[in-house]
Image: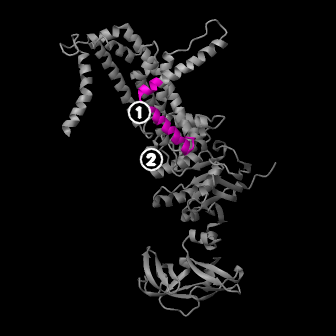
Amino acid sequence: MTAAPANDIEFRSVTKRYGSVTAVSDINLAVPKGAFVALLGPSGCGKTTCLRMIGGFEQPSEGTVLIDGREMNGVPPYRRPVNMVFQHYALFPHFDVEQNVAYGLKQARPKLAAAEISARAREALEMVRLGGFEKRRIHEMSGGQQQRVALARAIVNKPSVLLLDEPLAALDKKLRTAMQIELQTLQRELGITFVLVTHDQEEALSMSDMVCVMNAGRIVQMARPREIYDRPADLFVADFVGKTNRIAATVEADGSTLRLSNGMALAANAKAGLKPGAATVALRPEAIDLVRQSGGGGSELAGTVTHRIFLGSTAEYQINVDGLGDFLVTADRRSVQESDLVEPGERVVLTFDPGKVHVFPA
Amino acid sequence: MRALVTFVYLFLYAPIALVVLFSFNAGRSASEFTGFSTMWYGKALGNTFLITALQNSLMIAFTSAVLAAVFGTMAALGMQRLSARGRAIFDGLFAAAIVIPGVVIGIATLVALVEVFSFLNPALASIWPGDKPPQLGLGYGSIIAAHGLFSLALVTMIVKARIASLGRDIVEASSDLYATPFTTFRQIVLPQILPSVLAGFLLAFTFSFDDFIVAFFVAGSKTTLPIYVFASIRRGVTPEINAIATMVLVASLLMILIARVLMRDKTTKAHAGE
């Protein structure tokens, strides 16, 4: 007996072309059993194509997709042990809620007993908190309810992998947050692998335990959410996941001194192993402290507040830094000295820990 | 402006109203109303030539509409798989088939059929084992073929519009839920497009039942109801003709009404298929 494969899904050098357009380019990916993985990227980055290749709606032009250790090339969707929650739910309008949920079970051969199908459909509806809605028509349900029917229709089949294609995109913000929590809970209860496609970085970071950032048909970085945010692999990830201030800079010949374009020198992290030459420094808005008076320390930048976006407990400031241009700074209201809010037009000083900057070759 | 519109409608519908009115005339005249009677309806229904023509028309209309509904639906489904360009070409061809005048279709079909028969009949005779090889000729078959082809374009256009509004994702969802392509067609696609297929069938039926021009060209020695009416008019318009016309009118209007209701039907309502 061979050991069960550790990965539910594996991409081996997968490329997908449409005519002359390459949608997915030589991707290698392994999704461990029971993981919640998010494929994150801007539209057109190939994330949906990857999902559709797992579902069987597209076939790779090159390479292999494996599900549960089995090669899936050429296997149609109806023979794959995965189920998908479609972006626009794709519920069957001529069936009621229970008929929709029972649809997958009814296809099982040998046939399942009608009583079992009904019981399992009801159980799945209970899981998504739709007990009592069995006989409702689809068009009588709200968007959020339809979303949960789609979810129940997929999980009722106990697939080894659940695919979610931008499942929350059509919901309003409050409902979306509630569903994010529900999806996470559901994934833990079921213990099955979830693969989520999203362009919403917040959604990816908050729900998944592994984020796979994609750009232009390639995987740029695959890591835990925290690592993606704290240690972006390149400028694209730094920009796409969260907000970032970019500063043009030069790495000096010693490989450890950074000179910003306004002439200021920073001591770069020695272990970074920087190559001398042009570079871009990325700095998160919340890594910057805003003070009114210079403390006389090393890494300080002076500037004028141009805009303030009040967000309740925090505020976002746009600050024109002398010689460097516009910066975005997120400040907790309590952390700004003297008064909790700085007014546009005020002169301020920005301080930051040089260890928190990320340096990328330009 | 209002008066103009009134006149237009008057010109359109007054003759039809007169036909209906005089079908109930007690006298023989088609210009002088002498009293109410349904005797002409009785007379029309007792006319064996008329009843034969009616039976022919019903049989032809039903057969050609069934063929058009089946093959038109298949064509509409098949066209989904074409490239955008191929689809545009077929769209154009189908639309053209609908707007081509009946006279042209009639002549073209006649010429084509005669050519085919003159090629097939000797060929058939040469391979036929018995003494009396069958002779292919104009008749029911040729009317059904001509009507069926025209109606096929009609059905295809109607069903295609419905398929376009269906969206690919419910087909994919069905496939994702382990349904084979055939099950997906039977459980998901067919129930959704069925109203439009029926609407297409009814319009095809109405077209064939009412058609005179195309049938006149390809009927050979056979008589359909419109051909019978045309032939008897040469002996003068009698209230009997009016009675026939009124019955055809009512039947056609009913069919078209049902077809329209079916086409309006949205997926969200009705048709719980299982």
Residue at image point 23% right, 26% down: B14
In x, y percent, where is residue B66? 49, 24
Residue at image point 43% right, 36% down: B270
User: Can residue B226 be seen in this snapshot?
Assistant: yes
In x, y percent, where is residue A97? 50, 42
Give the secondary structure at mark 1.
helix
Q: Chain ID for label 2?
A: A
Mark 2 neighbour class, 10 Å CA radius: few under 14, some 14 to 19, many 20 or more? some
Q: Amino acid at mark 1?
A: Leu
Q: Which residues are magenta?
A: B80-107
Circle 1 is placed at which residue position? B262
In x, y percent, where is residue B77? 54, 36
> Is B98 within the magenta?
yes
Circle 2 is placed at which residue position? A141
Image quadrant for the N terminus of chain B? top left
Tag shown at residue A309 = none
Residue A172 vs residue B258, the one in the foreground: B258
Q: Chain ID for label 1?
A: B
Is residue A264 left or right of B199 when viewed as pictured?
right
Is residue B43 left or right of A10 when viewed as pictured?
left
Residue at image point 40% right, 30% down: B259
Is residue B232 left or right of A117 when viewed as pictured?
left
In x, y percent, where is residue A46? 61, 58
Q: Total number of numbered labels? A: 2
User: Can residue B274 be seen in this snapshot?
Assistant: no
Q: Quadrant of residue B173?
A: top right
